[in-house]
Image (cartoon, rainbow, N blue to C red):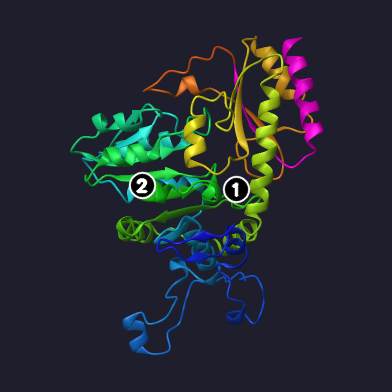
Amino acid sequence: MNKRNHVGEVTEGVETTLTHAGREPANQYGFVNTPIVRGSTVVFPTLSALEGGKQDYVYGRRGNPTSESVQALVTELEAAHGTLLAPSGLSAITIAILSTVKAGDEILVTDSVYGPTRTFCDGVLHRMGVTARYYDPRIGSSIAGQITERTRAIFVESPGSLTFEVQDLPAIAAARGERDVKIIVDNSWATPLFHRPLALGADLVVHAGTKMFVGHSDAMFGTISANEGAWKSLLDTHGQLGICVAPEDAFLAARGIRTLAIRMKEHHTRALELAAWLEQQPGVERVLHPGLASHPDHDLFRRDFAGGGSLFAIALSPRPHAALAAFMDGMRLFSMGYSWGGYESLILPTRPASIRTATSWDATGPLVRIHVGFEDADDLRRDLTEGLQRYLA
């Protein structure tokens, strides 16, 4: 499907962008993929070039053709002013946050946030003199009552990667009004193919690129994209922290992103079908996937998202811990692992009640997070059926 830019002109479809953006074969001896460029020192031909910075690259830490190719592609996908790379999703999150706050400020953070983000806010930010306050992810426009004169940023993760609440980003952006409060969105689940936070009022978008962008579970990677108003502070913070990405990892990310549209279509379809099937299975009390009509945020999802990611969760009926061990340990195709986004299916028990502070988690049974990979769908259902039988035995 073609898209239109802000002046109404027809531009390329996203599949075309994914295939061609960020590549310049004419500048790399005709090779289709931007090669891995390793190096630290960049030499200047003249004093004038050195003093004026009159060349594309000045030092290895500040980028090279390999990293720039990924930055250009993600910038186009997010319709951002610019994109910077980070060596992990968590580092992308921390850089984005640090670019918006200083000692004495505060940040509002969704209570459904990724655990390591919360740990950073309660640890490093606290030591810096920055206060993190957590809010109900379904607060919507009522967040206006949480914003104070010290608030400098609002961190949104939509949906939350454990409990899958969808946040009303346009309402949050409107509630901010004209105040200098930056909105940061973790968009790792939906990717810019299915969700465009900058168009809905966000200022910065982060990705745990390790997951959907890389897509093969073989590289750590993160991205931070910003609108024009947030760009300079982001660029300065990124540079002052000395952040850089290994060219091999940037190359693997570029390779993965080229197939993102095809993979996301499959992940969306497979995950939604499996989630709907699990709603009917014994031992499953609730399925947390915003693409399901039963999800309380389904209408928001339909309004703001074009599709969903590979990840969702199931709340099981209460059983002894030994039953959960029997369920998990006997899996043949679903491996236990902390990440997601690769070709292999994963499963992980989680404990949201242990970390929430602004809201409570009311499920009495275990919550199990599922990432749906590319195995045969019947085989995955069989694996889960056998697991649920062990759980209920």
Gap in angstroms between the C-alphas marked 2 and 1: 23 Å
- The image quadrant of residue 56 is bottom left
Q: Which residue is mark 2?
A: 201
Which one is nearer the viewer's eye here, 125 or 141?
A: 141
Q: Quadrant of residue 336?
A: top right
Q: Earlier in the sequence, mark 2 or mark 1?
A: 2
Q: Is residue 73 left or right of residue 224?
A: right
Q: Nearer the viewer, residue 76 or 321?
A: 76
Q: Residue furthest front?
A: 8
Q: Which residue does the image show at 39% across and 39% down from the upper left?
A: 169
Give the structural element (helix, strand or loop) at label 2: loop
Magenta region, residue range: 366-393
Q: Amino acid at mark 1?
A: Met
Position of residue 318 measured from the top left corner of the image (x, y, whole percent): 61, 10
Residue 212: give its label.
Answer: 1
Residue type pointed to by label 2: Gly
Crowding at mark 1 (Cα within 10 Å: few <14, some 14-19, many 20+): many
Q: Position of residue 95 (x, y in %)?
A: 39, 50
Q: Position of residue 373 (x, y in %)?
A: 71, 40
10 Å neighbourhood of mark 2: few (<14), some, or many (≥20)? many
Q: Which residue is drawn at the image coordinates 72% and 20% (left, top)? A: 327
Q: Position of residue 224 (x, y in %)?
A: 44, 53
